[in-house]
Image (cartoon, helix red, strand yellow):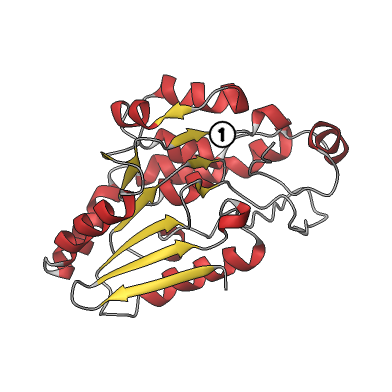
Amino acid sequence: MSIRVETVEETGVALVTLDRAEKHNAVDLAMAAELSSVWREFRFDDTVRAVVVTGAGTKAFCTGIDRGAEVPQPSSPYSIDDPLIAIGPKANDLWKPVIAAVEGMACGGAFYLLGESEFVVASREATFFDPHTTYGMVSAYETIYLAQRMPFGEVARIALMGTAERTSAARAYETGLVSELTDPGEAAAAALRAAAVVASYPTEAVQGTVRAVWSAREAARSQALALAPHLIALGNLPADGQEELFGSGRGRGGFRLR
């Protein structure tokens, strides 16, 4: 199992941990399936009223898709089989509040999770970046998720600067991606405290509020996400071009550590 789930029944909070610290919590196909399953199970578990999602260790929250994973692609140009598209809670119709706790790096496909969380708590040593353009790939889904939280210019800078620049936790806080900064190693604890407060309120009111917040931007978000696969199909380098940039045998998305 690449996901750990711990539930504190006294508070009604579940802690979901991406448990591949040796791979900087990169998402392989097994983890993607587990995440989707976990979110859907929470829909039917009345003991869980709020969730915190974090990564194991302190080096990374998540570094996107595991480039060592074999990701089969359909032959049709009209289909893109993105293994990360359903790793977030909203993609699985979960409207219980989810808080993300970030230590270390969060990049690329990590924004699928951060983008579908209600808010983000981060260590002051956390960093955020998106490597797609560096490797000849379109940053579509990631950019759309970021644009729901940050000013246009900040999103554009993260997406276009690629691996050349990392956004600090302080800057992420200033521009709205992060709502609370903590000392190193304390992000999960702070997120759990906030989640316990939210979980103590009547769950119908909380879930209705979550749905109301998301409905404020749902139309624009849905339209943008519908366009994303077409932009990826048009703008990504062909497979051989990507291999020339970052080596053969690597999957789409994510970040290769040097």
Classify 10 Å Cα crowding around label 1: few (below 14), some (14-19), many (20 and above). many
Q: Is residue 223 visible?
A: yes
What is the three-letter code of the residue carrying label 1?
Asp
User: Which of the 4 quarters of the picture holds residue 41?
Assistant: bottom left
> Which residue is at a point 63% across and 68% down the rendered structure image?
30
Residue sitting nearer the eye, 20 or 178:
20
Q: Position of residue 230 (x, y in %)?
A: 66, 40
Position of the C terminus, as image quadrant, is top right
On screen, residue 162 above or below 183: above
Toward the left, the furthest residue is: 201
Q: Is residue 229 left or right of residue 146?
A: right
Residue sitting nearer the eye, 80 or 193:
193
> Which residue is at a point 48% across and 38% down the rendered structure image?
144
Q: Is residue 6 left or right of residue 230?
A: left
> Which residue is at a point 37% across and 32% down the rendered structure image?
169
Position of the N terminus, as image quadrant, is bottom right
Q: Position of residue 184 (x, y in %)?
A: 35, 42
How many marks do you count on the picture? Answer: 1
Q: Position of residue 172 (x, y in %)?
A: 36, 30
Q: Is residue 211 visible?
A: no
Helix or strand or loop: what does disc 1 sit on? loop
Query: Where does label 1 land, which residue?
Result: 130
Q: Is residue 26 left or right of residue 10?
A: right
> Which residue is at a point 14% across and 60% down the rendered structure image?
197
On screen, residue 112 above or below 42: above
